[in-house]
């Protein structure tokens, strides 16, 4: 079973349901790929950046414990949502907290989990 986590600037339940859509289901947040990458490099100097194309970033953050998997993620094409794979270490939680710190507090962020691509 595949699990993916997302952090988005809108409530995913409201966003996916046309009856609940309103002005809160859209956001003007734009995450600049280069800026995000630079901040990531300051936090995790050994991060592997795989690509920055049209502001979309893909990364892998190595774990301090080399026996554990890295945290793999990407900034989606809308430059508002990050997606990442689960990781059984403190790195997983540190990334989530770090992401909250680098995004302006004026934006509400929502955490979403999907299993096998089903939200």
Image (cartoon, rainbow, N blue to C red):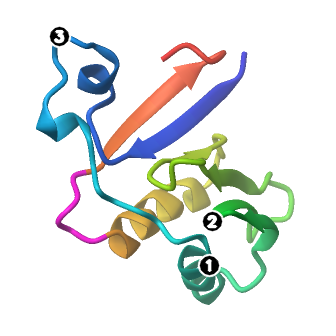
Horizontal side of residue 38 vs 68, given as left or right: left
Residue carrying label 3: 19
Q: Residue at horizontal 60%, vertical 78%?
A: 40
Q: Residue at horizontal 52%, vertical 62%?
A: 95
User: Magenta residues, as a range?
Assistant: 104-108
> Looking at the picture, does residue 71 appear above or below residue 104?
above
Disc 1 or 2, which lies upstream in sequence? 1
Q: Residue at horizontal 48%, vertical 28%?
A: 113
Q: Residue 86: x and y, percent?
A: 63, 40
> Looking at the picture, does residue 43 appear above or below residue 32?
below
Disc 2 or 3, which lies upstream in sequence? 3
> Looking at the picture, does residue 112 appear above or below residue 53?
above
Magenta span: predominant SS is: loop
Query: Which quadrant does the N terminus fall into?
Result: top right
- Number of residues whose C-alpha sits closer than 10 Å to that of mark 3, classed few (under 14), some (14–19) or many (20 or more): few
Q: CA distance from mark 1 to mark 3?
A: 36 Å
Q: CA distance from mark 1 to mark 2?
A: 7 Å
Circle number at residue 55? 2
Occupied quadrant, residue 42: bottom right
Residue carrying label 1: 34
Horizontal side of residue 102 vs 19, given as left or right: right
Asked whether the beta carbons under mark 1 and mark 2 sit within 8 Å of each other, the answer is yes
């Amino acid at each position: 079973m595949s699990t993916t986590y997302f952090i988005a600037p809108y409530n995913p339940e409201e966003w996916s349901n046309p009856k609940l859509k309103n002005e809160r289901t859209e956001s003007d947040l734009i995450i600049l790929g280069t800026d995000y990458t630079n901040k990531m490099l300051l936090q995790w100097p050994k991060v592997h950046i795989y690509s920055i194309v049209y502001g979309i970033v893909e990364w892998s953050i190595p774990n301090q414990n080399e026996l554990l998997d890295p945290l793999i993620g990407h900034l989606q094409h809308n430059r508002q949502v990050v997606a990442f794979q689960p990781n059984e270490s403190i790195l997983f939680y540190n990334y989530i907290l770090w992401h909250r710190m680098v995004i302006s507090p004026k934006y509400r962020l929502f955490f979403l989990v999907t299993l096998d691509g089903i939200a």
